[in-house]
């Protein structure tokens, strides 16, 4: 009986040790890979929206349900790359940065419509226009970092 108890104690402490080891290993790894590289060049694409596209207003700007609908679409189509919180993953950059949050709704709509295919941001023209505008409302609702005072982001 004593031997069994001793064997048990040994295996339990071994288990505990390996759990601790596994945790420290995985947390070390995620700290490196979960932080997407911040590179302003990535967001340069939004600046390329033609003026006419950039100045388009969101037809759903005052639709009270658009943000919630956009959140569902985001979880379905975008989270796999941009992460649930939109803060980015190794696959795609954060959407909470100033470059995205201060982009006009029209510029974001244009980007979703055209994608950045050569850099693995898909084209979303297959989503009906109202859904793309809902996504724009959702992205804008996230707010991102504190605006510098000249932010065109309308406060709800
Ligand atoms: C297959 C992975 C993937 C999916 C799915 C995806 N994206 Fe992206 N997205 C990217 C990548 C990669 C970039 C960076 C492109 C670049 O370098 O310009 C990006 C960039 C962006 C940008 C920043 C614009 C810029 O200048 O690059 C926005 C806004 C964006 N995505 C929105 C979305 C939305 C909204 C969805 C869902 C409808 C979505 N993305 C789905 C990979 C993805």
Image: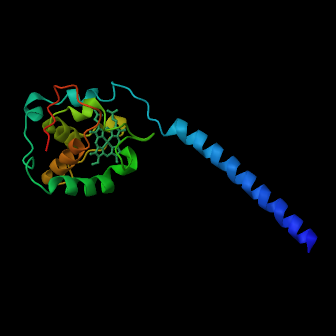
Name the residue located 20 percent from the left edge and 57 percent from the top edge. Answer: 69
The image shows a total of numbered marks equal to 0
- Left or right of 66 in this view: 116: right
Between 17 and 77, the one lying in front of the other is 17
- Left or right of 125 in this view: 39: right
Name the residue located 33 percent from the left edge and 24 percent from the top edge. Answer: 41
Q: Quadrant of residue 141?
A: top left
Name the residue located 12 percent from the left edge and 55 percent from the top edge. Answer: 64
Q: Position of residue 73 (x, y in %)?
A: 26, 55
Between 67 and 120, the one lying in front of the other is 67
Q: Position of residue 84 (x, y in %)?
A: 37, 50
Q: Quadrant of residue 27?
A: top right
Please, which colouring scheme is shown?
rainbow
- Left or right of 119 in this view: 108: left
Between 135 and 22, the one lying in front of the other is 22
Q: Position of residue 127 (x, y in %)?
A: 20, 53
Q: 30 above or below 7?
A: above
Quadrant location of the C terminus in the rendered image: top left
Specify the quarter for ligand 1.
Answer: top left
Outermost residue, front side: 2
- Left or right of 13 in this view: 149: left
Q: Quadrant of residue 150?
A: top left
Q: Position of residue 8 (x, y in %)?
A: 83, 66
Outermost residue, bottom side: 1
Q: 7 above or below 113?
A: below
Name the residue located 78 percent from the left edge and 57 percent from the top edge. Answer: 13
Quadrant location of the N terminus in the rendered image: bottom right
């Amino acid at each position: 009986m004593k031997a069994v108890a001793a064997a048990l104690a040994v295996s339990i402490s071994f288990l505990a040790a390996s759990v601790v080891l596994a945790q420290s290993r995985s947390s070390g790894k995620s700290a490196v890979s979960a932080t997407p590289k911040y590179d302003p060049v990535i967001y340069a694409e939004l600046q390329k929206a033609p003026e006419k596209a950039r100045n388009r207003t969101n037809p759903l700007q005052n639709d009270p349900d658009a943000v919630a609908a956009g959140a569902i679409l985001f979880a379905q189509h975008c989270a796999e790359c941009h992460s649930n919180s939109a803060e980015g993953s190794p696959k795609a950059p954060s959407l909470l940065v100033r470059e995205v949050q201060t982009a006009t709704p029209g510029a974001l709509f244009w980007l979703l419509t055209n994608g950045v295919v050569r850099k693995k941001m898909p084209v979303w023209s297959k989503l009906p226009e109202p859904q793309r505008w809902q996504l724009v409302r959702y992205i804008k609702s996230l707010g991102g970092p504190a605006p510098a005072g000249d932010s065109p982001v309308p406060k709800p």
